[in-house]
Image (cartoon, rainbow, N blue to C red):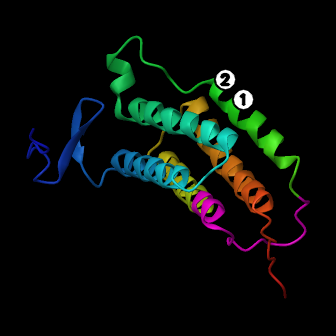
């Protein structure tokens, strides 16, 4: 099996059926979403809690759907799924559930903890970058924008939840 086409050797690729530079804003957004998906996969290798794993597997799926929408694939396939209201509500619901066992935030929390929590915090930071790239690319889809915004918030709550579940005491910024 051949793993390359050579079509991108001159710094161009196809997005939305249009040949564009690999430095195009939408290509950068797709790259950030792809990186986020890879970090979610890495986090899954460290997490032992079934309910957290289930949520992250849905998010992995959603990120592939989101990437398909950004790349124009969803436009070519009538039956393709799109990120929608239910996906945003899923994140909100999961966030509310995991937030119940976290303490109130009174100071900035250092991004440290055990491997499962810190890998989720890396996902959070990459999700924020992906959100900025999606905005810079001019994406206007209401649910893509809501989903990527909620995702980073959910990942922050999940980071805190995992630290608590692992009995790791959060450290806060001291002046």
Left or right side of 76 for 42: right
Q: Is 142 placed above or below 125 here?
A: above
Point 34% across, 47% down: residue: 27
For the record, the magenta segment spans: 103-120
Left or right side of 19 for 157: right
Residue holding disc 2: 86
Classify mark 2: helix, strand or loop.
helix
Check residue 2 in the rendering and tell me which mark sits there, or answer none: none
Q: Nearer the viewer, residue 83 or 158?
A: 158
Q: Is 93 placed above or below 45 here?
A: above
Quadrant placement of the N terminus: top left
Any magenta on residue 73?
A: no
Q: Are marks 2 and 1 in contact (CB under 8 Å)?
A: yes
Rendered location of residue 175, percent (x, y): 84, 88
Residue holding disc 1: 89
The Cα–Cα distance between marks 2 and 1, rounded to whole angstroms, is 5 Å
């Amino acid at each position: 099996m051949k793993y390359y086409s050579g079509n991108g050797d001159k710094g161009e690729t196809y997005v939305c059926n249009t040949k564009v530079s690999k430095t195009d804003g939408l290509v950068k957004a797709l790259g950030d979403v792809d990186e986020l998906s890879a970090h979610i996969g890495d986090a899954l290798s460290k997490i032992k809690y079934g309910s957290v794993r289930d949520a992250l597997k849905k998010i992995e799926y959603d990120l592939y759907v989101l990437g398909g929408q950004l790349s124009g694939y969803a436009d070519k396939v009538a039956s393709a799924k799109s990120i929608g209201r239910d996906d945003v509500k899923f994140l909100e619901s999961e966030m509310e559930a995991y937030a119940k066992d976290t303490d109130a935030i009174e100071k900035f929390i250092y991004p440290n903890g055990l491997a499962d929590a810190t890998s989720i915090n890396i996902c959070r930071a990459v999700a924020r970058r992906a959100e900025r790239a999606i905005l810079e690319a001019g994406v206007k889809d209401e649910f893509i924008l809501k989903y990527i915004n909620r995702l980073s918030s959910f990942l922050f709550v999940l980071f805190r939840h995992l630290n608590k579940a692992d009995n790791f005491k959060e450290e806060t910024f001291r002046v």
